[in-house]
Image (cartoon, helix red, strand yellow):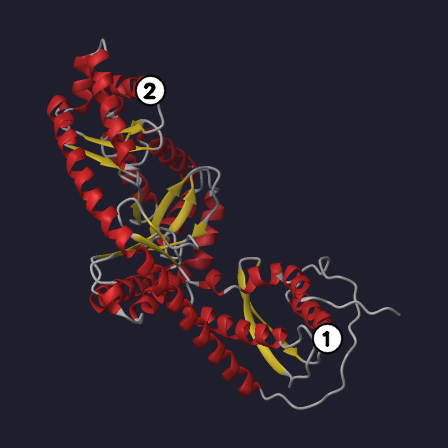
Amino acid sequence: MSVRLFTAQQAAVALRPFYFLVHPDRFAHSPEVQKKNEKSLQIFNGYLNELFPQPREQRPVQVRFSIMKNDKLRDVAFELSGNDPVSIVKNALEKCELSTENLPKVSVQPRPYSSPFNAEDLWNNLQQREIKRRKRHQKSLLQHIIQKRAEAVEKTVNYQKTKEFIQDEVSYVQQKTGLKEIIWSMNWDQSYMRRCLINVLHMLKHSSNKERVVLALHNHTLIFGRGSFICCDGSIQFGADDVPEAWLDVCIESTVRRFEVRNLVRLLDRVKELLGGAEVIYDPRGNLLQTTHQLQSLIVRISSRSKAEMNELAEVARNLQVEICNSYSEINIRTDGRLQIPSIVDGKLLLNFIKDNKEEILRRRKNFRDLENEIDNAKRRCIIALGLDDLSFDAGIPEQRLLSAVEQLRTMEDVEQFKGLHLHISHSPNVFVMTNGAISVPLT
């Protein structure tokens, strides 16, 4: 029988569903599980790496992972033994009830047992490798910072000059319209921001309903973002990609639409009452019309249940933080302990979900508050240690990974190169200077 080698690349492809299932980032809400999976994954990868390009005999070692199946957390344990990578990969997939269809049908020539491999030695080797990897990362990042420092300083100066220039134009638009404030909800390029301001003046100059436009804007906040609408707090949003005619339509409708703000307050109070006094969280700058429709839909759904079920729901939902989402969403617990409820949820399903998960919801909220405090403290320590002007980060980064990245930054050497800089931790794998002069650095 011909023997074909099973490569490390083939192993990686076959193990993709396994890595996704056990990845520590999926368990950011549970630091204990996250730490356990991270350690087990290091041991698993370390054992597997020793089998390529030529398999080596190693001492058997057991690994244990936590996985989420059917919305329930359970443990999976299996032994790493032998020098056949195909068998090890297949065993890992089968233990987690995952498909082995991507596993090539190969046979690997085993080697006779040569010498024992101590699990403690394996762990020490993995630790040493991790230390070396971090040092290489630090060296690489430091080199990038040195290379980008002059560009960052220059862009920061230019950004501040342009910002002052745009502020003069903002003040002029405010004077013409009576706007209380103008803000951008996204990190727009400043030349694009200036074009938005010019388009507002252009709309005002050429509109046949100038008085209604000024009335719509006067003493309100104007937001440039995605889409044009009246916000939940009465602010007005212009879609930065929309044509001025769409802005004009929103201004003309604003008088009628803003009556819905009072209705929104009544709807929020009603949802709060139905959920036993739970804190209903909403975006003040969200779409007013969309938000009221979602609240109305949820009220109808809950109110259609029996009085006994409504009373039970009010009891179990007490002390929760809830967020009402669109009809395409599912009931979900966020990492911060907030319960996301679709506007068309079935009342009975919602009741059962809260009963089954309330302990987990409250635990996540407490852990998130603790983690938030840790991140704030770590950020302050990092800014002081490196002498940074500021430290920011992308939204949506898992809190535990963010904390680890901030702590890792704090230990950087040659702190003189960081003094006065603004660093931004990003999902992007590249190091580059942003338009505001901040240096974007990778999360890992």
Q: Residue furthest top?
A: 208
Q: Is residue 363 visible?
A: no
**Quadrant occupied by the N terminus:** bottom right
Q: Amino acid at mark 2?
A: Ala
Crowd tier of the residue under label 1, counting other residues whose Cα lies within 10 Å: few below 14, some 14–19, many 20 or above: some
Of residues 301 and 85, the one drawn nearer to the viewer in this rendering: 85
Helix, strand or loop at disc 2?
helix
Q: Is residue 23 visible?
A: yes
Q: Is residue 411 left or right of residue 103?
A: left
Q: Is residue 44 left or right of residue 204?
A: right
Q: Answer above or below: position of 27 versus 190.
A: below
Q: Amino acid at mark 1?
A: Asp
Q: Answer above or below: position of 32 versus 101.
A: below
Q: Answer above or below: position of 19 versus 341.
A: below
Taking the spot 23% from the left edge, 52% from the top edge, the residue there is 153
Q: Residue furthest left?
A: 175
Q: Which residue is mark 1?
A: 84
